[in-house]
Image (cartoon, rainbow, N blue to C red):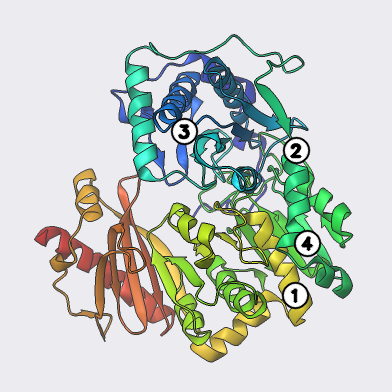
Amino acid sequence: MSDRAGTRATESDLINVDALIAAYYELTPDVSIPEQRVVFGTSGHRGSSLRTGFNETHILAITQAIVEYRAQHGLTGPLFLGADTHALSAPALATALRVLVAAGIRVLIDTHDEAVPTPALSLAIIDYNRTRTGAERADGIIVTPSHNPPADGGFKYNPEHGGPADSDATNWIADRANELIAADLEGVQSVAEINPAEPPALVERYDFRGAYVEALAEIINFDAIREAGIRIGADPLGGASVTYWQAIADRYRIDLTVVNPEVDPRWAFMTLDWDGKIRMDPSSANAMASVLEHRADYDILTGNDADSDRHGIVTPDAGLMNPNHFLAVSIDYLFSTRTNWRADARVGKTLVSSSMIDRVTARIGRELWEVPVGFKWFVPGLIDGSVGFGGEESAGASFLRFDGSVWTTDKDGILLALLASEIRAVTGKSPSELYRALTEEFGDPAYERVDAPATPAQKAALGKLDPAAVTATELAGETIIAALSHAPGNDAALGGLKVVTENAWFAARPSGTEDVYKIYAESFRGAEHLAQVQEEARAIVAAALGNA
């Protein structure tokens, strides 16, 4: 923890935007260096131009690979293209557009020439495809590194279902992109720079904001919010939702104030995250410190990250809610009020989300659908309505419309922020008050994520670990009732290990960027027991790796 965590950024913390963009064009990656290769994580390829991890060469190659992937799958429909407010996003969007136009693909970009939230792009794809089948269906690209620091760029492909591409697609795209880079971009086709004032006929305009804001009436009870007079403060944290929040206030006539409408690619107005870096993470109390100063001014105060796929919920009585806590409250509320959802609609959670969700799900009589980390796993269930709600512990979630049809298949931070106000309006209690009621019913769990050192070889072994390698029979004084390497919900590989007892669990997963593995742990027996779980988790993982 940095001693500057939660304090205002100073000039020395800020990026040089001109240098960052210059590096985007001037530096050329060498794919023999692992850090300079195209690698798709759970949310696309990310990196910084200054470290030759996100440069024009990467975007030319990735976009060409997407063009070829579409051709292989016979996709001839339009492609929705949007970007967030990171400094590298606009140059990367322009690069991608040149390749897409050269390929003869019809591209839909924003009417207002403004940033596009990830959920708005997902919704656009889904709504376009509702009445279309086969080759004419649309897909999309969103240029964003999400909540990452200002020096980073990100590039994500969303296929016809509107959500994050699965690993079969991303692995193919990444491999092909690296081949193209290694061949000095031979095979990449692109047109000259496109004049925004006179774009080619293939480039059309789409009102992402208008379509998204109008459709919100199909999923949020604005009448209740307005009639209850809920005072809402929304802080976009300099991200893509900035104009969306004012449009929502105007369209639905609710008492909503955009707390900070400033957009600055340096994010000079931010407070520093736990490690002293600028990071637009609405689930971090340090990153949200300036927002929390206003907690007493509103009934509900919210934050979003740069592409608006994450949410932070602040209440006057509790401050910033733990994401797990809000997910549990949301599930309890939604499944009691959305009466037109399928009677067998399940509750979706990732394996590292709180077991409070398990207990709430059992009480409301629904099936729990536990999947590996990554929102892509919820996509099929959200599309067919068999999953009513899908959520991640990292403050990302989405759910169904009132009629039980799909909303977005990517995380929607704006939606979850609005849900907090609906909950407050309908129940008369804040989400944090409702969570305290859940702890009185089920117990008050202690939850934390910590990191432990691991060599690359150990990380690789952990990602493929067989539960049979776990020889321990107890964890922190309780009998181990399950050791898992595959998710109970869909039998997909976890890429790690989860060990469960009656009142506690831990999950260990290798980091994709550092020589550490992440230990997520929770105990319903308090903080001291959690510390014991964490200590023994390290020993169990070490022993399992030794036995593997």
Residue positioned 72% across, 41% down in the render: 208
Can you give x and y, in whole percent of width and height, for residue 24 in the image? Answer: 53, 20
- Report crowding for label 2: few under 14, some 14 to 19, many 20 or more residues within 10 A (C-alpha): some
Q: Marks 4 and 1, Cα distance to the nearest angstrom?
A: 18 Å
Upstream in the sequence, badge 1 or badge 2? 2
Is label 4 or label 1 in front?
Answer: 1
Q: Which numbered disc, 4 or 2, marks the residue that appears first in the sequence?
A: 2
Residue, far top: 192
- Mark 1 highlights which residue? 424
The residue mark sitting in front, 4 or 2, is: 2
Q: Is residue 283 above or below residue 177?
A: below
Gap between marks 4 and 2 measured at Cα = 32 Å
Q: Please name the residue that numbered disc 2 is placed on.
A: 207
* Tag in front: 3 or 4: 3
Residue underneath mark 4: 294
Q: What's the amino acid at mark 3?
A: Gly
Q: Earlier in the sequence, mark 3 or mark 4?
A: 3
Q: Compare residues 61 and 536 and report the one nearer the observer.
A: 61
Disc 3 residue crowd, few under 14, some 14–19, many 20+, Cα 10 Å: many
